Amino acid sequence: MPQNEYMERFTKQHGKRLDHEERKRKKIAREGHEAANRAQNFRGLRAKLYAETRRKEKIQMKKKIKAHEERNVKSSAPSEPSSTALPQYLLDRSEAKNAKALSTQIKQKRLEKAAKFSVPLPKVRGMNEEEVFKVVKTGKKTAKKSWKRMITKPTFVGVDFTRRPVKYERFIRPMGLRYKKANVTHTELGVTVQLPIISVKKNPQNPMYTQLGVLTRGTIIEVNVSELGLVTAGGKVVWGRWAQITNNPENDGCINAVLLV
Amino acid sequence: MTTVIPPPSKRQKREAVERASKLEEPEEIPTSSIRVQFVHRANNQPTGPSVSIPLTQATVKNLEILLNSLQGVNDAPDRIPYRFFHERRKGGADEEEEALADNADIWTSLVKSGIVGTEEELVLSYSPQAVFRVKPVSRCANSISGHGEPILAAQFSPATSSRLATGSGDNTARIWDCETGTPLHTLQGHTSWVLCVAYSPDGTMIVTGSNDRTVRVWEAVTGKPLGGPMKGHTAWIRSLCWEPYHLQEQGRPRVASSSKDATVRIWDVISKHADIVLSGHKASVSCVRWGGTGWIYTSSQDKTIKIWEAATGRCLHTLSAHAHWVNHLALSTDFALRTGFFDHTGKIPQGLEEKIAKAKDRFKKAATVNNKVAERLVSASDDNVLLLWDPFGATPTKPIAKLLGHQKQVNHVTFSPDGLYIASASFDNSVKLWNSKDGKFILTFRGHVAPVYQCCFSADSRLLVSSSKDTTLKCWDVRTGKIATDLPGHEDEVYAVDWSPDGNRVGSGGRDKAVRLWRH
């Protein structure tokens, strides 16, 4: 494996061979012949592997060609399939309709975006960094520069999390304050289930707390609702759903949340 | 704890008195008189001798009374309101016409500003205004749901404003009772969207054209189908037009339908048989109009307008001056042809002969210019231009005026019922008003915030209603160019609008599937 961009460096320093382009063209031209030669003459396992890679390549190629063809075809758009009825003077004009569809799409998107943040707890008590972080003062260097912090609030760390070496770990998330599950209430169904947390989506206090996975009151978390058996309008099973934490986890020792519907 | 306002000071009192005395002073009109010659606008013939009028008396109201008495009408209720025009000559070459407002007088509008002197003879051309007045619609009287899909076309019966026919995307047409705001009949039979509807000029039949390539005829009173579909077109129907009432053969009315398949078919409604097929266009025929002299006008997306003889199916002229699709056509006699023998008095002639005579008379009255029966044609196009044609003139294949001004495609154009104005609705969010005599631009109705789809004059030509993509209708005052009333209420684009021929109601329909009726 090359350890540096030594080839690029070389061309920068000395340029390319004078016949570089010609050789490249010839190599490309030869490729087909070489492929054919390999296909004909490989034997045994090598032949099998080669055939397999070639098959996959061909599938990709055909897909690409098909996509290009579809792009080139002039669609006879207004011929019918527009689902909504249009007056005769608009039937031959397709542009206007598309623009309308687009604008409604944008509006819909904005609505959804706005709805995402209309949450049960719109306001929470602010927390400053002194409350959340404790300065770690162990060891000679650490104490001197005091750059290490311990998070005093409950946190969520992902399943595949491993701590960094002591030298690089700026934030310590204590084992005892880590949570994997939340008691989530579905307000419409009126049930409360304990569900695994998938991730922390937003901590209203500070974007950094979101990154660190700090769980405080008002935090939006994503929970795994596959057990509830929720289904989308399209008929697909929902597995991740957003919920908002409603209690003070640092006081209670558990996490209670409401599902956002 | 109210504060008593201090009494006005001496200075304030003095100033108030001064102001009052100034206001009292009337505007002085000299006692001299002016000679006026009246000229009929349609035929340029002088009416009566030139009359000397004292300037103090020369208001438009008095001129009206004078003109009526010159024509022998002395009773107040029989008097006809007139609009007076003064021709300004600038350097002899280009002439300009200016209409006098209803409350103007000659001194302030013409003499004071030095346009005419009291020494010379003043020539005023006049044209009769409608003797009745349509009130601007101002409220939504009914919102009737019933259609399951967007409404694509709407037309009032020529006989009465209590019947409205609409065509919809739910494959049906409906007839509505506008008095009660209830659906009367559902016309079922089409297998696809009903794209156009048209009442026959005598109000007894309705013809519908559909996306399923057929044309169907219905009884207007009972809503029963008159026989099966008329098949023949190979693509969807774009426009329908009835044969004018005074040209119809006894018991054998005909209707013309234009289609995307580039042909126009003339159907015998009774035998359900295509009399003549007018083929000659190379692309979708967007609009068809049947003139009162037996000519058929068609516009097409192949950029041409063709004039045909309805009796033989011969192509008389091909007008090719447009640079893009021609979207719509209007005739100066459209209103008279649509309403046949119905007029604002509500008197319907008894016998068949009288009916035909009255329809013919109404057509002639609408079409006569300079003692000649000549209907004018205006075409709207995708090249943002309207062209005004005189098919009966010396050069029928040359447009007499090019109406420039729109900034996007022009979708719809219409003549006012009295034939004086042209209104055009465009995708550039504006409606423009033009003089139909020479195609001069008059004014722009601005107010819509999205493309304007359709517009329709009231029967007295004093008001205009327009429907737009911005979900509103707007009612405009033609003389001032201001909004008379804004009519919000629709929840989505308004595709179709029609003002009833008697002026009582406006009907509209659109994408929100509800028919709305608007009244004063």
Image: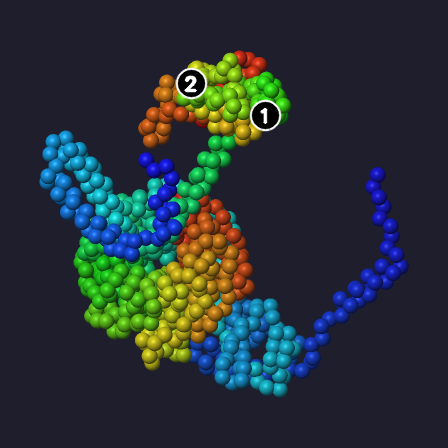
Tell me the residue at 55%/68% (across/down). B76
Q: Nearer the viewer, residue B228 or A58?
A: A58
Q: Nearer the viewer, residue B43 or A250?
A: A250
Tell me the residue at 51%/25% (across/down). A168
Is residue B335 visible in the rendered image? The answer is no
Tell me the residue at 62%/86% (across/down). B119
- The vertical placement of B189 against B327, above or below, is above
- Viewed as shown, does residue A75 lie left or right of B58? left
- In the rendered image, the residue lying farthest to the bottom is B119
- Expressed as whole percent of the image width and height from the top left, the position of residue B409 reads 39, 61
- In the rendered image, the residue lying farthest to the front is A14
Label for residue A116?
none
Q: Which residue is mark 2?
A: A196
Q: Quadrant of residue B357?
A: bottom left
Helix, strand or loop under label 2: strand
Helix, strand or loop under label 1: loop
Q: Amino acid at mark 1?
A: Trp
- Expressed as whole percent of the image width and height from the top left, the position of residue A204 reads 55, 28
Label for residue A147?
1
Looking at the rendered image, the disc whose residue lies closer to the viewer, 1 or 2, is 1
- In the rendered image, the residue lying farthest to the right is B10
Cβ–Cβ under 8 Å for marks 1 and 2 = no
> How has the structure been colored for display?
rainbow
Q: Nearer the viewer, residue B249 or B135?
A: B135
> Few, some or many C-alpha atoms within 10 Å of disc 2 (few <14, some 14-19, many ≥20)?
some
Tell me the residue at 32%/28% (across/down). A235
